[in-house]
Amino acid sequence: MDSLSDQAIVERVIAGDVEAFSVLVERYQDRVYSAVLNYVSDPDDAVDITQEAFVKAYSKLSSFDSASALYTWLYRIAINTAIDHLRKRKSRRTESLDDDKYTEVGYEPMSRDPSADPDRMLIKSEQQRALRKAISSLSDKLRSVAVLHDVEGLSQEEVAQILKVPIGTVKSRVSRARAELRRILDSQLGELV
């Protein structure tokens, strides 16, 4: 069944083959998770949001328009679910002074490569942390295009489809997001960028 097109699998699921949906999950779960993680910065939240996005996609599969690509439809559901999650989280009070400890991605195991440079790894880790923090500080509109276009590597046309906005809007938002990220990172990292 792995060789079937997305549309053929969608048709099988709608016809009652519930197990066929697992092929779509396997096909897209890593990409959707990656997009969500870059959006919310918390691996545990990203897992939950990704799972919720696939549940929503399954329940709304009959409304999928086969004229568009399935993965853009899935990304739209995932990003909207992530936005909803962040809005709910903003309404809850967080512990104020120790927030950084909750945004850390986790521990990185020691490299087994003897030529690995610990200083370079530390700088790279700090840059990644700073980038995630900078992305999370963008507005929803700018964060969406930054994650989908610059992090996930989708074309501007695909991003426009996912977000249901004109391509000119995507181009403008990409430019504004990059400028804002550059400004934030310059102030955070200085010479490391």
Image (spheres, rainbow, N blue to C red):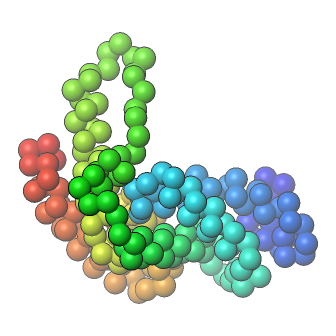
Q: Is residue 81 left or right of residue 24?
A: left
Q: In percent of the image, x 51 and y 53: which residue is there?
A: 44
Residue 83 seen by the camera: no
Q: Who's the residue at 32% across and 15% down the image?
A: 115
Residue 60, visible in the rendered structure:
yes
Q: Is residue 62 left or right of residue 45?
A: right
Q: Look at the picture and state if 102 lies above or below 53.
A: above
Give whichever of 92, 1 is nearer the camera.
92
Residue 136 percent coordinates (x, y):
32, 63
- Identify the residue at horizontal 84%, vertical 55% (top origin): 1
Q: Is residue 22 left or right of residue 176?
A: right
> What residue do we see at 40% from left, 56% from top?
41
How many marks do you count on the picture?
0
Q: 73 and 68: which one is in front?
A: 73
Asked whether 175 or 34 is in front, the reply is: 34
- Residue 42 drawn at (x, y percent): 43, 54
Q: Residue furthest right?
A: 16
Task: Please state the horizontal and vertical placement of residue 142, each as a whole percent of the image.
Answer: 32, 74
Position in image of residue 160 (x %, y %) = 45, 79
Q: Quadrant of residue 65?
A: bottom right
Residue 86 picture quarter:
bottom left
175 relative to 89 in the view: left or right: left
Quarter of the view holding residue 31: bottom right
